[in-house]
Amino acid sequence: MTDTDAHHRTIRSFVRREGRITRSQQRALEELLPVFGLSSEGHIDPVAVFGRSAPLTLEIGFGNGDSLATMAEQDTASDFIGIEVHRPGVGHLLLELERRETGNVRVMCDDAVPLIGRCLPDHSLDRVLLFFPDPWHKKKHNKRRLIQSPFVALLVSRLKPGGTLHLATDWEDYARQMMDVLSAEPGLANEFGEGAFAPRPDHRPLTKFELRGERLGHGVWDLVFRQRSPA
């Protein structure tokens, strides 16, 4: 068991607020997850999974999956793996993949931390995306935030040399913490200079949540870091 696994066995970075699963989402979980899903046991071989060698993106916590489906549809030359713990969101994404006839996405429904440690080989990812994770905004709950040094070190180990880690949050305090944690990681370099946040990259679709926040005057902070190539 790694330090990261041990940390998250006792401190969860999420709460299962599943709500109601619709009939169509339940049907998707039963019929489509076997088609688009990946096993949570053993290492994943992306070439075997997708039947080709292509740039590979991991999105952690994809919510309802609309952004992931859009990114995959717009970048058919790349492959995507999405991890989400909430089953209604997984069901929604599966329905979108079926509707759009998208073949370059695979889905995992579980806690991301042990899955990444157990299933993804070292240096297998070209890009990792984590958009709007739970900010755990009360100070006494900050320890539950996902972006902490052990988890970032795990992500760095899974990135290819030169691969990118892209985070986004609408909570300024969390953005500052993210900046501190990523800047302290020796395996990462800020694409936009020391301490600098990034403009929203074109590949990150605007979500309904984000558009609503913009109308209310909320800010959004993007961070884009690159894995340092070996000397």
Image (cartoon, grey):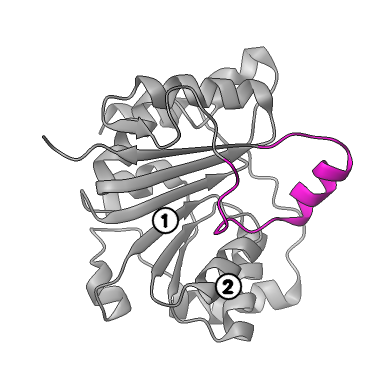
Residue 17 pos. (x, y %): 70, 45
Residue type at mark 2: give it: Leu
Vertical order, 41 against 128 (above or below): below
Camera-side residue: 126 or 87?
126
Residue 208 is covered by the magenta coloring: yes
Vertical order, 227 against 203 (above or below): above
Residue 16 pos. (x, y %): 64, 44
The residue at which mark 1 appears reads as: 58
The residue at which mark 2 appears reads as: 29
Outermost residue toward the top in this view: 140
The disc, 2 or 1, on the residue closer to the chain's N-terminal end is 2
Quarter of the image for residue 54 reads bottom left
Q: Residue at x 34, y 32 (%)?
A: 189
Residue type at mark 1: give it: Leu
Camera-side residue: 164 or 102?
164
What is the span of residues highlighted in magenta in the rendered image? 199-220
Element at badge 1? strand
Q: Looking at the rendering, in which quadrant would you find the N terminus? A: top left
Outermost residue toward the front in this view: 193
Residue 184 is covered by the magenta coloring: no
Outermost residue toward the right in this view: 216
Name the side, left or right, on which 213 lies relative to 9. Answer: right
Name the side, left or right, on which 11 lies relative to 27. Answer: left
Measured in 3D between alpha carbons, the distance from the residue under mark 2 to the one under mark 1, in whole angstroms, is: 20 Å
Q: Residue at x 44, y 46 (%)?
A: 112
